[in-house]
């Protein structure tokens, strides 16, 4: 686009030229002129000349009776672009596109009024193109205006939040990291945080409608991108016959846009009315009400859109959509006007329009002088509006309302500058959106860390009770160490970029690194525990993260039959009991029993592992879904899948179900693998019964555990309370894994506690029980009245030397010191002021009882220790 005088020039028909919605909008509003590329005209004129000029007749180019001049001009430029794209020999003469361009450049008064002479070929082509071009033209206008709306609406919403004092704290928690929040919703929340960053005007009024702003505006952004993409394609596609294909290509996205625009309009109207309630005086309110803007106005136009859509009047449908969009833009302009009036109207007009800041008494004067602290982004926008109004010297409310409406009109010459400024604010390096976490990760605040530290302490104590030693391994391993150990889950391994010739991956679990460690060091036995983070390239969801802790206990080496297996399961019951999370069950099976079952059902040995992966999903999917996967995807016969179905439904009390499976005539007794497994399980269940924890175990033939390395007993703990988190612990025997890394096979068995899900349960239980958590273990606050740090340092150091958990604070106001102790739930205070220093005493204050005692300075440590021990 090149400049020519006061209007820009858009060249059509050139090689590689692309018609954009912005260009269509500019021409449709006489903000740009059209120039025809000479090469396009040469191509049309190069058609083989007829012996005689074709006969011509007068023809009026009409698109649709409902179209506005803007929409008609938009339709005409699309038609012009299509005519310039036809192939030579089509019968289109150069005179036709030249006439259309002259009509457009004349200002548009002649559209539909003056006929043009056309040949029969031209008439036929125009009749075929008129409706599709009208549809594309109006969609181009919709595209441009909706894009402008999606850019400006967040800035206007931010101004309203300040004007109404809305609580916007929830914008900080929009992105939970679980992957279930829309991308554009997160982006809008981020932009709002940037615009309001540092504002002292927000945070008072909680409303559900304001909190929904990121979701509503985010949906608009999402739909606008779809409309833009489909419109761009249709604007620049070749000549097509008929309107059906174009209507379908654009209609679905326009319908979604209509719904999003209606919601944005209603949301904007609500915020405008919130801000209007802060306005003192009737002049602005009467101007607003004079416009008769209500939710009914939006809904009425919305109904007209729906009717046109149902009647398949496609051009009227997009026209009514454009009317709705214009109404929404008008509401957003009013929202901006009212918000600005509340924030700065009094200063500009000297009138009582912003909550009564202008007043005659001293109190009002003092309030008026108080500095208003805008957000970093909103402050820039407010100043931009002030500069415009002041430069025009507008001192009458009605006049600057009119000018603000003009400023927020996409046709205004300064509107592009406003959009650019908004984009600069939200995209600038200086005030870029606040840092965010990668999906599937979390920060843990002090209260959460207190819960975690307590849990880790309990877990470590249980592990040590059973004689385990601690082990730590690198957070990443050679890729070859991890691959081939996790079956179908291998795709979830996080691979790292090549750093100097070694291909590495983040550890997927702690078991494979443990096996690598045992093999690498030539160990034949080891009982170890490890608490560390692991990483999985999974889809985040509730209770499922990409970075999380595992708490592992493993026993490697030759021991009595099923001895280590019994101990590991016993440890699991101790962990879950002592963490006090509530009711749970441990589902248990045997990999050899599973293999025997598959063999009995007729599954080929090479498909055992992949079928196990399918069976392992039975806790999340129905058997019919699993059956479909086994038959359609993995190639089993329906008969074989049905046989598997009869077995995997078996679950119950360990000794009862075991007895059933071992009774005479059982097919399991005829299979070598399953017979060995049943003997193992008999020993294990008897040991668990004697240890009084077998009641926590459920023998479940559907438990499969998809990992490739399991060879014996497998188990999985499931929480049975209201908080749905899935599996909270799992493990099993893996006799061949260590041998994969060395020459010696070392049998092993272990369990891994999914501590993140346990934390979710613990946090929920605390909320339900209304329990408060102390983030620190501080026992004493040394509170020094005044500003003498050395005295505070001396007192608190004596407490630290005596191993008392203490903090210190120096302040001139005693209530500040007491508030600090209360907020941190510190039970005791040592209060020292000028009098106490002079008299060689200190005050001991019990925060719970508020009782204060005076003790000698020389004995205060001893006195405090005595009270703490009590």
Image (spheres, grey):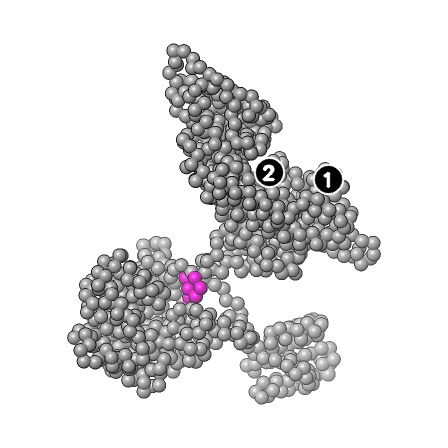
Quarter assignment of residue 687: bottom left
Asked whether, in this view, residue 698 is left or right of residue 845, the answer is left
Q: Which residue appears at 23% of the width and 58% of the height?
A: 635
> Which of the 4 quarters of the picture holds residue 793?
bottom right
Left or right, residue 520 beside residue 27: left
Mark identifier at residue 410: 2
Magenta stretch: includes residue 547: yes
Q: Is residue 591 magenta?
A: no
- Mark 1, residues whose alpha carbon is within 10 Å: few (<14), some, or many (≥20)? few
Is 458 on the left-hand or right-hand side of 403? Answer: left
Give the camera-side residue of 312 and 662: 312
710 left or right, relative to 776:
left
Q: Circle 1 — which element?
A: helix
Residue depicted at 32% across the width and 69% down the height: 511
Identify which residue is drawn at 58% across, 33% down. 68
Which contiguous range is marked in magenta? Answer: 541-549
Residue 399 is labelled as 1
- Using a 10 Å C-alpha cutoff, classify the residue at mark 2 as few (fewer than 14 neighbours), some (14 to 19) or many (20 or more): some
């Amino acid at each position: 686009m090149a400049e020519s005088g006061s209007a820009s020039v858009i060249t059509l028909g050139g090689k590689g030229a692309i018609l954009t919605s912005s260009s269509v909008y500019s021409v449709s509003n006489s903000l740009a002129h059209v120039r025809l590329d000479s090469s396009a005209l040469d191509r049309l004129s190069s058609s083989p000349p007829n012996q005689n000029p074709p006969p011509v007749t007068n023809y009026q180019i009409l698109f649709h009776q409902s179209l506005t001049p803007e929409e008609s001009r938009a339709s005409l430029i699309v038609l012009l672009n299509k005519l310039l794209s036809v192939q030579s020999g089509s019968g289109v003469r150069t005179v036709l596109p030249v006439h259309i361009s002259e009509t457009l450049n004349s200002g548009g008064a002649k559209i539909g009024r003056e006929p043009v002479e056309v040949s029969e070929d031209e008439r036929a082509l125009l009749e075929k193109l008129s409706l599709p071009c009208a549809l594309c033209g109006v969609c181009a206008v919709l595209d441009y205006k909706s894009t402008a709306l999606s850019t400006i609406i967040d800035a206007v919403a931010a101004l309203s939040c300040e004007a109404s004092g809305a609580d916007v704290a929830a914008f900080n928690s929009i992105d939970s990291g679980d992957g279930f929040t829309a991308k554009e919703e997160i982006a809008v929340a981020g932009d709002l945080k940037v615009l309001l960053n540092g504002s002292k005007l927000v945070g008072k009024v909680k409303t559900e409608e304001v909190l929904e702003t990121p979701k509503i505006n985010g949906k608009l952004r999402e739909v606008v991108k779809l409309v833009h993409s489909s419109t761009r394609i249709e604007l620049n596609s070749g000549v097509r016959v008929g309107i059906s294909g174009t209507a379908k290509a654009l209609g679905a996205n326009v319908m979604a846009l209509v719904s999003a625009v209606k919601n944005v309009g209603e949301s904007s109207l609500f915020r405008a009315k919130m801000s209007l309630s802060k306005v003192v005086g009737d002049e602005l309110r009467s101007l607003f009400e004079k416009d008769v803007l209500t939710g009914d106005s939006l809904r009425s136009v919305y109904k007209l859109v729906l009717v046109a859509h149902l009647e398949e009047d496609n051009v009227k449908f997009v026209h009514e959509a454009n009317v709705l969009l214009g109404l929404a833009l008008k509401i957003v302009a009013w929202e901006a006007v009212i918000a600005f009036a509340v924030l700065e109207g009094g200063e500009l007009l000297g009138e009582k329009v912003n909550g009564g800041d202008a007043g005659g008494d001293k109190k009002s004067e003092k309030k008026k002088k108080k500095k208003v602290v805008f957000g970093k982004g909103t402050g820039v926008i407010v100043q931009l509006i002030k500069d415009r109004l002041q430069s025009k010297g507008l001192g009458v409310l009605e006049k600057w309302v009119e000018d603000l409406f003009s400023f927020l009109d996409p046709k205004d010459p300064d509107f592009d500058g406003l959009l650019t400024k908004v984009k600069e604010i939200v995209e600038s390096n200086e005030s870029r959106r606040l840092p965010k976490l990668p999906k599937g990760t979390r920060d843990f605040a002090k209260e959460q860390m207190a819960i975690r530290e307590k849990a880790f302490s309990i877990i470590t104590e249980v592990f040590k009770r059973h004689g385990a030693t601690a082990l730590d391994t690198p957070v990443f391993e050679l890729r070859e160490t991890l691959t081939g150990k996790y079956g179908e889950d291998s795709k979830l391994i996080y691979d790292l970029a090549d750093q100097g010739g070694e291909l590495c991956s983040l550890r997927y679990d702690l078991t494979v690194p443990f096996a690598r460690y045992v093999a690498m060091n030539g160990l034949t036995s080891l009982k170890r525990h490890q608490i560390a983070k692991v990483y999985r390239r999974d889809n985040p969801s509730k209770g499922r993260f990409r970075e999380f802790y595992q708490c592992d206990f493993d026993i490697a080496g030759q021991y009595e039959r099923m001895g280590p297996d019994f101990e590991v399961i016993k440890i699991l019951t101790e962990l879950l009991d002592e963490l006090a999370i509530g009711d749970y069950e441990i589902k248990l099976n045997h990999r050899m029993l599973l293999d025997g079952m598959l063999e009995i059902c007729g599954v080929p040995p090479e498909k055992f592992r992949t079928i196990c992966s399918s069976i392992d999903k039975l806790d999340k999917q129905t058997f019919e879904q699993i059956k479909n996967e086994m038959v359609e995807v993995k190639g089993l016969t329906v008969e074989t899948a049905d046989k598997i179905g009869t077995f995997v439904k078996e679950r119950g009390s360990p000794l009862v179900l075991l007895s059933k499976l071992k009774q005479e005539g059982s097919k399991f007794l005829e299979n070598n693998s399953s017979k060995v497994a049943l003997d193992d399980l008999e020993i294990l269940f008897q040991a668990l019964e004697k240890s009084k924890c077998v009641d926590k175990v459920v023998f479940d033939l559907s438990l499969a555990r998809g990992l490739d390395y399991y060879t014996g007993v497998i188990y999985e703990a499931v929480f049975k309370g209201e908080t749905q988190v899935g599996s909270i612990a799992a493990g099993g025997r893996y006799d061949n894994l260590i041998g994969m890394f060395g020459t010696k096979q070392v049998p092993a068995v272990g369990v891994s506690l999914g501590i993140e899900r346990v934390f979710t349960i613990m946090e929920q239980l605390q909320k339900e029980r209304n329990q408060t958590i102390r983030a620190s273990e501080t026992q004493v606050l040394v509170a020094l009245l005044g500003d003498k740090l050395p005295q505070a340092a001396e007192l608190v150091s004596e407490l630290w030397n005596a191993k008392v958990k203490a903090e210190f604070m120096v302040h001139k106001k005693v209530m500040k010191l007491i508030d600090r102790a209360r907020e941190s739930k510190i039970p005791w205070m040592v209060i020292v002021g000028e009098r106490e220093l002079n008299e060689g005493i200190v005050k001991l204050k019990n925060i719970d009882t508020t009782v204060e005692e005076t003790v000698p300075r020389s004995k205060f440590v001893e006195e405090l220790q005595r009270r703490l021990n009590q």
